[in-house]
Image: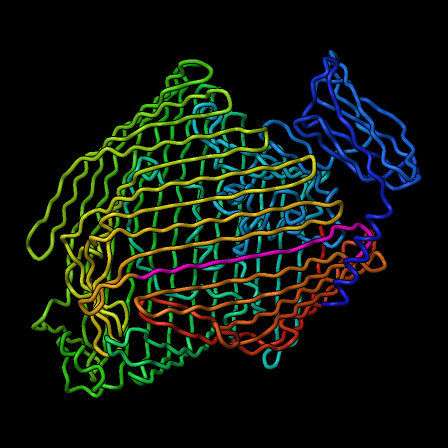
Amino acid sequence: MKNLLTLLICLVASTTFAQVKVEGVVKDNMGNPLELANVVAVNQETKALDSYGITNDAGRYKLSLEKNTNYQIQVSYIGMKTSEELVSTQEVELTKNYTLEDDTTLDEVELVYEMPVTVKGDTIVYNADSFKTGTEKKLEDVLKKLPGVEINDDGEIEVEGKAVSKIMVDGKDFFDGDTKLAAKNIPSNAIDKVEVLKNFSEVGQLSTVTNNQDNIAINLKLKEGKDKFWFGDITAGTGIASEDGLYKVQPKLFFYSPKTSINFIGDLNNTGEVAFTRRDYFNFTGGFRNLSQSSGTNISLGDNSLSFLNTTNDKAESIDTKFAAANFSYAPSKTLTFSGFGIYSGTKTGIRENNEVTYTDDELNIPDESTTNYTQQESNLGLLKLSTVYKPNANNQLDYDVFGRLSKQTQNKFFNSSVLGQVDQIEEQTPYSINQNLNYYYTLDENNIFSFEAQHLLQDEDPFYNAFIEDKATYANTADVLGYDDAQTAYDAAQNKRVKSNKLDAKLNYWNVLNPKSNLNYTVGLVYSNQKFNSEIFQILDDGSEYNPTPAEGSNTNDVDYTFSDAYVGVHYNLKAGKFTLTPGFSAHAYNTKDTQFGSTNSNSFTRILPDATIRLQLKKSENLNLSYSMQTNFTDVTQLAEGLIMNNYSSLFSGNRELENSLSHNVNLSYFSFNMFNYTNVFGVLNYSKNIDGIRNSTDFESVIATSTPFNSNFADETFSARGRFERRFGKIKANLSGSWSWATFNQFIGGNVSENNSFTQTYGSRISTFFKNAPNVEMGYDLTINDNEQGNNNTKFYTHRPFINLDAVILKEFSFVTEYSYYDFRDEEISLNKYGFLDASLTYQKTDSQWEYKVGATNLLDTQSLSQSNTGNISVSNREYYIQPRYVVFSVKYNL
């Protein structure tokens, strides 16, 4: 790392001291400064663009040019005549001011060189080739180098600190509801322009009357020649591992024309490359929005999916992946468009881990527990979406979407506990959901706009759980509560659950545009939800038959019918006053809930007014400050109301509470963003505060390590505060980045009849510096620090994770590309280091100039790290977990670029 740091310093120094600054001011013929004017300097000898700049709000620009060199300076601005001048640099700085004249012609300005960045209203356009250094393979490699654009740790694209909600290619949706598939699969050499669309509106008719400040989309413009035939690549490879052989096959094919687009992504490998994780599956929205949440109502339908780990390639011993995804768009006419996608992901995962759990509350007398387990997971996930948009004219638009999920998942866990002995567990489920969306938008005239939006969700979940517990003595008290037959050789506990959810969400909006700076929005809406829940805990006897006990305490069965409805009206006023945009409003709700179980019905009805407001201060064209407040009513799902026993797992029993009431939350958000095109400084900061009143908490009792919990409405308010921010600045070919996030929460826990306050504080800090040289090795190095601090009563735990890293990529002899990534982890408490480990990956690629064939040798985990550690701090315990991971892999692959 020391040698690489020395190389970076030398590159920076040699680049800095060999340059001279040229700066000045650009004005119009009235003497007014022109903001966002383009200034480029083209080297007259090499004909290359050596530097470019964009003026700030005072019309100032700044260029860094080579000494003793001849340049053509070109200054351009929309609606103005372009100014051109030949300039010869010397050894001293130059000041050059420019005045642009009005241009009454309609001809487009002919530029001597394409600007790397241009700004057109709320759209930032990046010329992709201007930021490439030669080692980029996929879209995400280009996006990482664009000013103001980031790829976060989850692989999501962020602009202004906000997640990008949609990726389009030549205006056509690319797997609506996800950005990772585009970032990781679209080849970088196909991209001409990256258009960042801020304040993006799905419906053009509503763009002037709705608040879209949090909506950001990206449209990719393809290079000429990539828009009328198939392009992409096909990769095949084999490899060397410690035991089994390795393989991967990855076809990625794309077709675009004015009327039709077809995309196909395939992946078959056992190298640990997970193309589509379970987290991606459940986060994949398909472009659907939660209509009712914007009104102030938040109703949960629960999550009864299996508790699979969200594995990555460094937290599993083996991973086999099968993945296929297809996306299409077809426009038979200018008024009608059909689109859709289908995704299949099949994964087999082997996980081996050790876990040490220390209980921090001595009064509970819970024994510390050591566990070892090996888990086999198999997951088959499917997504399907079909959409149509009919827009006969500018005043009418009709949309229909149907989005389905189907999966089959199993998990076998072989578990050994120092307290409970050997426990073998089986989990299975085959859930599905169908979500339909119907929208109609109508513009009566420029002052009256209507929209109708309706969604229907049908969801069916059927998790099955089975635990075989050999140590009867330790489990005897729990077995007695469940009413199990003690005459069997072991306790074979099982549970069937079924949750069927039906939800209808509809609302009608009317906007009355009072004048160009204000409008009124009236909303009428309805939310209706019905959930049916059945569960049954039973015992499998030695002869294989099922035994359904009726214990003395509680019931092992549930049969619950839960209905929720919310009829609401809302009024919001939108006003633009100078630099301010104000949107105060409120919604009035009539709520009804009813649950039926054990032969009786429990009903509740009430009304509530929920205010909300947003204030936006537009300081400059690319600088704004936003403040928002909302009050929200939160409702739980049917499983929290079911009073019969539920087995979350062998050591965790749960009994619901039908007397639960809604909770009320106050939410405040303050955000700041600034993108200075003059010196490419990108700054954003976000503050969030939430206070939850009458929140649902669990009262928990322990019998050894076996917990039994019941929910109730807490009289203590829970509070959370979070902040995050990032500062980024470019210095020529160098980019520096500082970031941080802070999350603080305080809540009360109820265990064994005692109440104690819990405070948790999580901090993350990051710093990195990157280079973007065209003809030299590029380095990214940085340092990340994570601090987890948890205080429960008189007990305090604090853990640190230090992560220095360095990445290097270089083009060698024009035909070789070398990329390596190294990260070092030091996991420690306040006194000693608990675990140290490092990861080193590297690849060498060869592609002859103008050849479609590419050859690559890549190695992962070159240091052959065997395991890694992770700490989790809970309400009453601290766990240290050791994961066994995949060994060193070396893979040889061949890629054919279409």
Residue 316 image point, x, y percent: 50, 72
Q: Which of 134 and 606 is in front in this view?
A: 606
Question: Is residue 60 rendered to the left or right of residue 671?
Answer: right
Question: Is residue 345 rendered to the left or right of residue 290?
Answer: right
Question: Is residue 111 rendered to the left or right of residue 720?
Answer: right
- Residue at 17% in and 52% down: 660
Observer able to see residue 227: no
Q: Give the range drawn in magenta.
A: 758-777
Residue 309 image point, x, y percent: 42, 66
User: Which of the 4 quarters of the picture holds residue 129?
Assistant: top right
Examine the rendered structure and indicate whether residue 834 appears above or below residue 514. Answer: below
Examine the rendered structure and indicate whether residue 612 appears above or below residue 772. Answer: above
Question: Is residue 789 rendered to the left or right of residue 466?
Answer: right
User: Which of the 4 quarters of the picture holds residue 298?
Assistant: top left
Q: Which residue is most to the top? A: 104
Observer able to see residue 76: yes
Q: Nearer the viewer, residue 641 or 231?
A: 641
Q: Nearer the viewer, residue 638 or 662?
A: 662
